[in-house]
Image (spheres, helix red, strand yellow):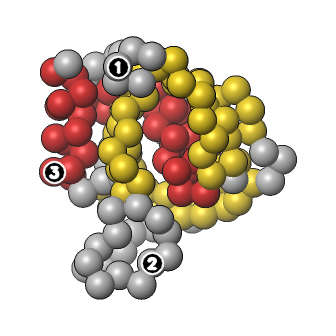
Amino acid sequence: MQLIKNLVDTLRCSDGVGLSAPQIGNLKRVLVYEYKKPKNSTDKTPDLPLTVLINPEIIKTSAKTEISEEGCLSFPNMFGQVERFKKITVQTLGINNKEIKFEAKNLEARIIQHELDHLDGILFVDRLINPKQIYTYQI
């Protein structure tokens, strides 16, 4: 499917961890994500393989939430603190059009929630803990 190829290519070219179809001008309910630690990184976050979700929905959330930094390819170099569920259960179609259900936690859960928001017309800036505390990093 060309849409999925475009999403993956854009995600990788942009050095992001997640991307949804609306971000590239397509209103289909499709998202992709992938996380690979930089070489020589001391980051203990596990890598996430390239994953494609079609018509995803969260069917269960944990009681525990976590506040952490988020950014977005739609707002380059802007960051803020967002509260998200630590663990979610997702029901979706996979790339082979078979229904799957899985549990995601920590970074994977955060990415899915962020990208699902895009599918619903919500941006991370709409969810900031303190909208006056958006920031950038100097490179």
| Residue count near mark 2 (Cα–Cα under 10 Å), binned few <14, some 14–19, many ≥20 | few
* Residue linked to disc 1: 96
Residue at 63 percent of width and 41 percent of height: 103
Q: Mark 1 is on which residue type?
A: Asn
Q: Secondary structure at mark 3?
A: helix
Q: CA distance from mark 3 to mark 1?
A: 24 Å
Q: Are marks 3 and 2 in contact (CB under 8 Å)?
A: no
Task: Tell me which label, 3 or 2, sits earlier in the chain.
Answer: 3
Q: Earlier in the sequence, mark 1 or mark 2?
A: 2
Q: Position of residue 128 (x, y in %)?
A: 60, 52
In the image, residue 80 sits, relative to residue 121, either above or below, namely: below
Q: Is residue 129 left or right of residue 114?
A: right
| Coordinates of residue 118 in the picture (x, y in percent) | 46, 32
Mark 3 is surrounded, within 10 Å at the Cα level, by few (under 14), some (14 to 19) or many (20 or more) other residues, namely: few
Q: Position of residue 18 (x, y in %)?
A: 37, 45
Circle number at residue 13 = 3
Residue on which the image places disc 2: 43
Element under disc 2: loop
Seen at 75% across and 54% down, the residue is 65
